[in-house]
Structure formats: structure tokens, C-alpha cells
Image (spheres, grey):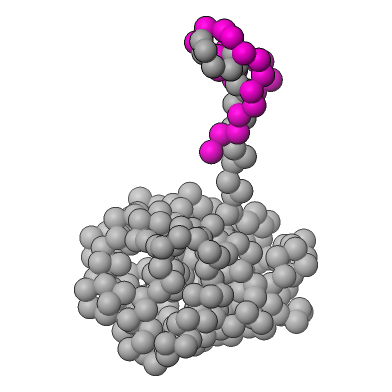
């Protein structure tokens, strides 16, 4: 809400620019002018790193019934294997990073590693979101946009144990802050984010909007990955697979709701208890 300040009585209706970034509003029979101070902008959720891209805070998202997701608790990212010493200082000292959940396959994670984060006390958990095709080429299947929800459901069906284990780490306040990532930070990471956020009551529109933010950084991610031999098969930016549209996530969330009762229902089907769900919500949501 805009803040206002009464200045003096008795002038005709109107507004004028004060020249100082505020407006003065006047009206007959009411205070002569009111200084309108715009609210401060929402802080950016992007975390700018020199050696990694597509890193953002999942805090500040609206929650059904009131409140928002907590800032500084849960982050999503593309691969962190190229982080610099300055990046590590920001993550560990600035953001209090304690846990990295690596959603890449075991061979992929072992081959590419974790870069400079291996020299820190940050706990690393490899909890792979398994691909329908176990070969690394399955990371970038040739799927048109309107079939991505089928691909995402395939990831869920193959990864119940690991994604549930990831949710348990997220629900533990002693593990925070926590970042989860894959290679691009779009599909495996997007599915994990969608399940967690849906389970704690973030509306589908907000989840889809966050998912679509990857489109702002995907070119940078692709350019970085193309310097790594394992990822040189990634298709060009114009390829439908490289898109990160809100529609794709909306379609996936609709299927998740219809088939499992949403993120909470999917977690419950994979052994997540009511007590764990309550703890997850308490950890991630600020009322």
C-alpha cells in the first residue's frame, strides 16, 4: 500500500509531481496535498553467481490461506560444479548454505562433480530424479512442449524414493539453507520444486510463473553447459524442449492433481507421513 503524508488544508482537487520521486494529491475540503510514497520494490529472488546460473530463492511466493514461503531457506539452481571461490563465500557465508541436493544421475554427478563446494562442510546428497531413459541423453528428450507433462510424470513415477528423501531433507530446519539442482535447473529441478511448493499450498499460478523464470537464464545455462563434453548434445534454444513456459507447468500440475491429489498426495503415496507434511509446511511457510 502506498504511504501518504498530509501537508496542508484547503486547495482544489489535483495532483502534482514534487520533483523528488513523490506525488502531491490535493482536493477541496480535504487536505490540500498528500505526499504519496510508493512501496519499496520486492527484492529479487535471483542469486547472481559467477560460476553458476539459474539460481533463485523459492521464498516470497504466496500460499493459499495466507502467508508466503520463507526467504533464505530453499533455493533451486542449475549445476553448481563451476562455482568460484567468491560464489562459495556467498553461498556458505552469505546464504548459510548447509545442504546441496543433487538431482543428477549418479554417473553424471560423479563424472561432473561439485567443484569447489567439495572443500566445504556443506552436506551433499545425491538423490537422482531418474529418467525414463537411463542414458544421459534422456536429460534432453525430443519432446514437444505439449507433451512435457508426460515426461515430468515419468520422472515422478521413477523417482518416488529419491524425491521423498529430498522432501525430508527440506523439512528439516537443521539442513537449511538448502539448494537442489540438476544440470539445467529446469526439468528435474522443476519437478522437485513443483511437488514441494504444491504440497505446502503455493497456488499453481505462482508455481508456473516461477518455473517460467528459467527462460530468462536458459541461454546462459546452455552456453555454459556446451563447454562440458557431457552436455554437448543439448538442443538449440529454438528447440521446443528448451522452452520453459508456464503452460507446461500448468499442464503438469493439473495431471499431478488429477492422478495423485497434488504434491501432498504424491508424497503421501510415497511414504511421507502427515507429521512430515506438517513439518514441511512449518519449515517453508511464514504466516
Magenta stretch holds residue 14 = yes
Nearer to the camera, 202 or 84: 202
Image-based side of 164 in relation to 30, left or right = left
Q: Where is residue 103 in the image (x, y as percent from the top left)?
A: 50, 78
Image-based side of 29 in relation to 237, left or right = right
Quarter of the rendering containing residue 156:
bottom left
For the point 52% across and 12% down, which residue is it?
Answer: 29
Residue 79 appears anywhere in the view: no
Nearer to the camera, 35 or 21: 35
Magenta stretch holds residue 164 = no
Q: Where is residue 95 in the image (x, y as percent from the top left)?
A: 70, 65
Q: Is residue 151 above or below residue 273?
A: above
Residue 279 appears anywhere in the view: yes
Q: In this view, does 251 lie above or below 11?
A: below
Q: Is residue 82 above or below residue 7?
A: below
What span is in magenta?
1-26
Quarter of the rendering containing residue 203:
bottom left
Q: Where is residue 158 in the image (x, y as percent from the top left)?
A: 34, 86
Residue furthest to the bottom: 271
For the point 58% across and 46% down, which residue is it?
Answer: 42
Image-based side of 33 in relation to 197, left or right = right
For the point 63% across and 64% down, which residue is it?
Answer: 72
Q: Where is residue 68 in the image (x, y as percent from the top left)?
A: 51, 60
For the point 44% across and 71% down, which residue is it?
Answer: 200
Nearer to the camera, 75 or 83: 75
Amino acid at each position: 500500500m502506498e504511504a501518504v503524508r498530509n501537508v496542508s488544508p484547503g486547495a482544489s482537487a489535483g495532483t502534482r509531481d514534487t520533483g523528488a520521486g513523490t506525488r502531491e494529491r490535493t482536493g477541496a475540503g480535504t487536505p490540500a496535498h498528500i505526499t504519496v510514497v510508493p512501496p519499496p520494490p520486492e527484492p529479487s529472488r535471483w542469486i547472481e553467481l559467477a560460476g553458476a546460473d539459474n539460481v533463485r530463492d523459492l521464498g516470497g511466493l504466496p500460499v493459499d490461506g495466507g502467508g508466503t514461503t520463507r526467504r533464505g531457506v530453499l533455493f533451486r539452481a542449475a549445476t553448481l560444479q563451476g562455482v568460484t571461490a567468491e560464489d562459495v563465500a556467498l553461498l556458505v557465508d552469505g546464504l548459510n548454505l548447509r545442504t546441496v541436493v543433487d538431482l543428477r544421475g549418479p554417473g553424471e554427478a560423479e563424472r561432473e562433480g561439485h567443484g569447489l563446494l567439495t572443500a566445504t562442510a556443506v552436506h551433499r546428497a545425491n538423490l537422482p530424479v531418474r529418467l525414463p531413459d537411463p542414458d544421459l541423453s534422456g536429460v534432453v528428450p525430443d519432446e514437444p512442449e505439449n507433451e512435457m507433462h508426460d515426461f515430468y510424470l515419468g520422472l515422478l513415477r521413477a523417482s518416488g524414493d529419491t524425491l521423498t528423501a529430498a522432501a525430508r531433507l527440506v523439512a528439516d530446519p537443521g539442513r537449511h539453507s538448502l539448494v537442489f539442482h540438476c544440470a539445467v535447473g529446469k526439468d528435474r529441478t522443476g519437478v522437485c520444486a513443483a511437488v514441494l511448493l504444491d504440497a505446502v499450498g503455493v497456488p499453481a499460478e505462482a508455481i508456473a510463473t516461477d518455473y517460467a523464470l528459467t527462460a530468462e537464464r536458459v541461454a546462459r545455462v546452455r552456453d555454459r553447459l556446451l563447454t562440458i563434453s557431457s552436455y554437448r548434445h543439448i538442443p538449440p534454444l529454438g528447440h521446443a524442449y528448451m522452452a520453459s513456459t508456464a503452460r507446461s507447468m500448468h499442464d503438469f500440475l493439473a495431471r499431478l492433481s488429477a492422478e495423485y491429489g497434488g504434491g501432498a498426495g504424491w508424497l503421501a503415496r510415497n511414504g511421507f507421513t502427515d507429521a512430515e507434511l506438517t513439518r514441511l509446511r512449518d519449515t517453508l511457510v511464514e504466516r
